[in-house]
Amino acid sequence: MSNYDIWAACALSADGFAISTGLIEDGPQFSRLALHRAPGMPEWNYLHFESTLMWLTRLDGWRHGALLAALGIDGDVSFVGQQFASEQIPEAGAGDDEEGRGSMSQIRQLGDLLIACGYGSQVYVRDTRDAWTRIADSDDEALGDNAFEAVARNANGEWAACGNTAAAFREPTAAEQAELDRIAETGTMPQYLAAKERFETRLAGEIGCLYVRNKRRWTGVDLPGNTYLEDVIVLEDGRFLAAGGGGLIVAGRDPYGFEDFSQPSFAENYHSICLVGGRPHLLGDTVIHVLGKDLQLEEEIGLPDELQSPLLIDVADSVLWYFDHKGVAKRRQNAWVITDLPDDVWEEVRHDQ
């Protein structure tokens, strides 16, 4: 098996999909985008990016015939189809010059708009004039510094963003900072790091976060427990549904009125949510939980035995697709059909290709 993993994916149709492979690590960033049975293309088509692609989203009825949008870690957005175009979300992404606000996480289509989120509490919207506007960042005192993994907006113009908060530390006192400065000048690196760790006591670790935006104001939702959230979507009734680690499931619209739909038997860490026929499907570590419209468990779908490192689930033309870090499968007649991926998918990604 290749050392490369699938890190981003989306369904294009009942028979087609797109996946991005590469390595998530420090250093040069390269990704290989593979499109399978994309309209107007060969059965397998490959594109190379000097970026780590974090998210792929299918574009329905998009201008200029673009089939999908690919979001890079540094806020680069590529439109892939019969024509290719790319642009940069202003000030988004990690950045090489330390001016970036944080890595990007997700991009989604919302009619004629695109919405995107990332670390540093970043949330952006791209309007019909192709202009990106930032509507959230860590400078907002109501938000602080969060790693947003997912974002959604309902028909009423309300937003939800979820993920986890950054760990909080106590700042060194003036005397402690003077001691750190002295060690930095005369001591060793191990001495400095030991003193720094001693002085900067952790006040709080990373905990899950969920924020709702209404009338241009973000408000935090009180969550049960302290686990993280991985995804949030909009239900047919306009409520937001979010899920994450430890089987956490919450739903609501008003930030003060979210309900906990977790169940003691749900020990899965949820990675992804999608709606299939109006029913929420939640991808866990070993199983997909299918909820009814009352958000109670109706069905369990086990993952393919050969693919046990879940990435996300998606739906196209009413067909459920499962994307694993090591493969792809779709649901047909209550069984998984695994796609045979060619060796080219796993070929080493290099900057000179």
Image (cartoon, rainbow, N blue to C red):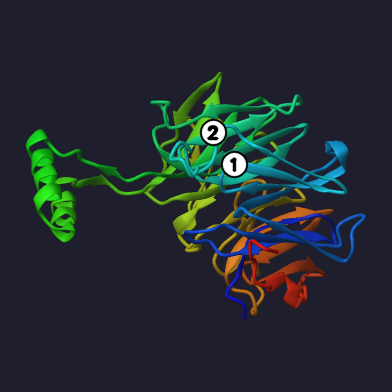
Q: State the image coordinates of residue 193 (x, y, percent, origin top left).
A: 19, 55
Q: Are marks 2 and 1 in contact (CB under 8 Å)?
A: yes
> Which label sits on residue 269?
none
Q: Nearer the viewer, residue 296 or 47?
A: 47
**Rendered image quadrant of residue 178:** top left
Find the residue positioned furthest to the right: 40
Residue in the picture at 7% in, 37% down: 175
Q: State the image coordinates of residue 81 (x, y, percent, origin top left).
A: 84, 49
Would residue 187 be found to the left or right of residue 81 on screen?
left
Residues at marks 2 and 1, CA–CA distance in whole angstroms: 8 Å
Label 2 SS: loop
Residue in the picture at 15% in, 53% down: 192
Look at the picture and state if 36 lies above or below 307. Answer: above
* Mark 2 neighbour class, 10 Å CA radius: few under 14, some 14 to 19, many 20 or more: some
Would residue 145 be found to the left or right of residue 211 on screen?
left
**Rendered image quadrant of residue 304:** bottom right
Residue in the picture at 17% in, 49% down: 196
Q: Quadrant of the C terminus?
A: bottom right
Identify the residue position indicated by label 1 in the image: 75
Label 1 SS: loop
Q: Nearer the viewer, residue 209 or 175?
A: 175
Look at the picture and state if 308 lies above or below 170. Answer: below
Q: Quadrant of the N terminus?
A: bottom right
Residue in the picture at 49% in, 32% down: 257
Find the residue positioned furthest to the top: 215
Q: State the image coordinates of residue 162 (x, y, percent, origin top left).
A: 51, 42
Residue type for callout 2: Glu
* Mark 1 neighbour class, 10 Å CA radius: few under 14, some 14 to 19, many 20 or more: many
Q: What is the count of numbered marks?
A: 2
Q: Nearer the viewer, residue 277 or 93?
A: 93
Identify the residue position indicated by label 2 in the image: 91
Q: State the image coordinates of residue 61 (x, y, percent, origin top left).
A: 86, 39
